[in-house]
Image: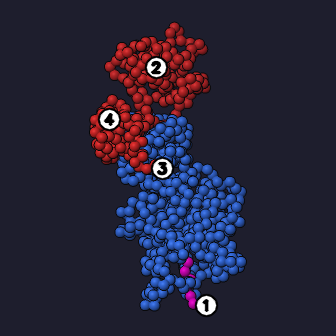
Amino acid sequence: MTLEEFDVEHQERSGGHGGDTGEKIVIFFGRERFTVTQERMTGAELRRLFNVPADDNLFKAEGPKVEGDPIKDTDVVDLEEGMHFLSVPKDIRGGAAGVQLHPRQQEEVDELAERYGDVELVPEGADNLLILSVPAPTWTVNPLQSLVRIPSQYPDQRPDTIFIAADAKPADGRPIPRLMTPAQPVQLAGRRWNQISWHFSGNYSPSRHNLVDFVNSVQIYLSSVNP
Amino acid sequence: MTTALTILESAHAIARAAFESTDDETAAIALATRQSGGGRLGLFIDRFELVPSDGYRERSPGNFSLEPRYVAEAALRAAAAGRTLVVAHTHPGALHPSGFSPVDDRMNRALMPSLLRTLEPPVGAVVYAHGNWRGSLWSEGGREQPIDVVRIAGRRLVLQPRRDRADDRAAFERQIRAFGSATQSVLAALRVGIIGLGGTGSIGAAWLARLGVKDFVLVDADRIEVSNLSRVEGSTPADAREGMLKVVVAERTIRAIRPDADVVALARDARECDVLQALTSCDVLLACTDSHSSRAALNQLPFQYGIPLIDVATLLRGSEGAVTGAFADVRLVHPGGACLRCQRAIDAETAAFEAMGNDERAVHRRFGYGPDVNQPDPSVLPLNGLGVSLAVLRLFDLVEPWLTWPDRITLEARNLQLVEQDVRPQGDCDICGPDVAPLRGDSYPLICRRPVTA
């Protein structure tokens, strides 16, 4: 592939927010060179152009520094010749403790992984946070990242309340039902979440209730928002 | 392709002190240089940068989380410096795993491909736990390769192999009694480059194979002649008749002792660029060349690639039965020490003459200039053996310190006097001087010769 073909390919992928002058602007994502004809692009357009993973922060680079905050999808970036961008994951988390689950917890997490695809486990204090994507056709983000805290002593401690990605809202514009954090989303696992008042109904019993039921019930909550 | 991470001794010591001073997990980054010659993919670290407090989101005895901005700026700094990035962290607990945990694996799976879009491969991640380093390198396409060997480069050579190749301990039982089982594991993991397979190098190759070394890079362009049969280990009259290459004879000797050895035999000039590149994959070098220009070429490797070099030279002075002097000279060259030039092992005039073509050399000689580099020096097997003995003892000392020798020792055999020579880097030396950055790896060109085809 020649450099020209490479540029054209990237350009075709770009779409564009506007300000198309027909003039070519060369920008860089890491080591890769892109030619665009738009003077302005949104963060979402840049993400698509550069093929940035959803779990990465997109930054504009200025020499050996990053400039400003991570570029949001809705931000509009005025492009200039030679501008550099890069991305790194939003959550850069390592550690020896890792996530060690009790066999019952592991079994239930495996069952959830089978149903919802990749699930993410992030240790937080003594608990583990379970993050997974749940279908949400009546929300602005579908599927919707949801988080459930697995208490360290589950099943003796019950799972309680759910968290949904802070950028998601009912598609019909109505307020988020049962929202517990109206003022400020909470930060967990390096991401922002809205906490939802959602609980096991009736008396919780470790022998009759489990994590799978609780996570499945998240779909009931999400579908309570009708278009 | 094997993989290696080389850490400068001072960087290791500073990091270790910081890592072991807290129960919390500690993270550090290093802007690393690269090495890709000789079938080995390597990274070199001359200093770690501990992540500052505002570079963490969270930090506890079992977990850490880094600010994306900090990591992004570290990647940008590495790219600007023409280097790559190694992300290091500790597992400080006694029961913590020595390698990556599942959380580390997930972090690496997301982070390394992102870094590779900004940085030339490889990028790396390492864990420091229980006094050892373990980790992986990631190549283009995000392919993870566990690091086969971690080297701590300095006055001693600490080698932390991923796999123990010392599978026949009974054969080495006597030396293990003295030097220990760990030393035997290191010997079995060492890749030793031997330059010059004549009167000293051939003995060194055979002895190291007997001691348990299994991985050799041999360099010598010369062929066996009748006059070599009195000194070259393993050579036969048939080799002299057939003009067998010295590296082929040495390889045959090694394989007779250690059939499972890995041997790369290069019948080439050590001064040539691709030969030097192949030697950058070694863990230690045994320089048995009598050529000053070859020494000058090899002299760069301890400082640029962190490879300790043991130079062996013998000198027999005499004429027609009157021996006037016999010396075995062994020099250790290591990062932080004095180079061969500062140890007065390289004569610039002789090196220049060696580099000349025969015609040019003849012209110079006709006008009375220069040493007669084609005139062979006197040599005798037992004196060579003395030199090799000192050199191999020195190699043991690199792995498991037990000697009190200075970096250069000379044995004056006639009066059996050991002369200890104090050597130190000259302030203005562009190889080992204080202003020279260590472990520059492939980021700095080697002074070498293009291969010349006949």
Task: Give me the chain letter of mark 1.
Answer: B
Distance of label 3 from label 2 (alpha carbons):
40 Å
- Percent across and percent down for residue A159 are 50, 18
Residue at position x 57%, y 80% in the image: B413
Question: Do marks 4 and 1 both belong to one polypeptide chain?
Answer: no
Label drawn at residue B321: 1
Range drawn in magenta: B313-320
Depicted B437 relative to depicted B409: above or below: above
Q: Which label lies toward us, 1 or 3?
A: 3
| Badge 2 or badge 4: first in the primary sequence | 4
Q: Is disc 1 surrounded by few (<14), some (14 to 19) or many (20+) residues within 10 Å?
A: few
Identify the residue shown where x is 44% and y is 41%.
B114
- Circle on res. B122: 3
Q: Is residue A91 above or below residue B31?
A: above
Q: Chain in blue? A: B
Nearest to viewer (mark 4 / mark 1)? 4
**Chain under disc 3:** B
Q: Give the SS element for disc 1.
A: loop
Query: What is the number of the mark on residue A41?
Result: 4
Q: Are marks 1 and 3 on the same chain?
A: yes
Give a yes or no on whether discs 4 and 3 share a subunit: no
Q: Mark 4 — on which chain does it sit? A: A
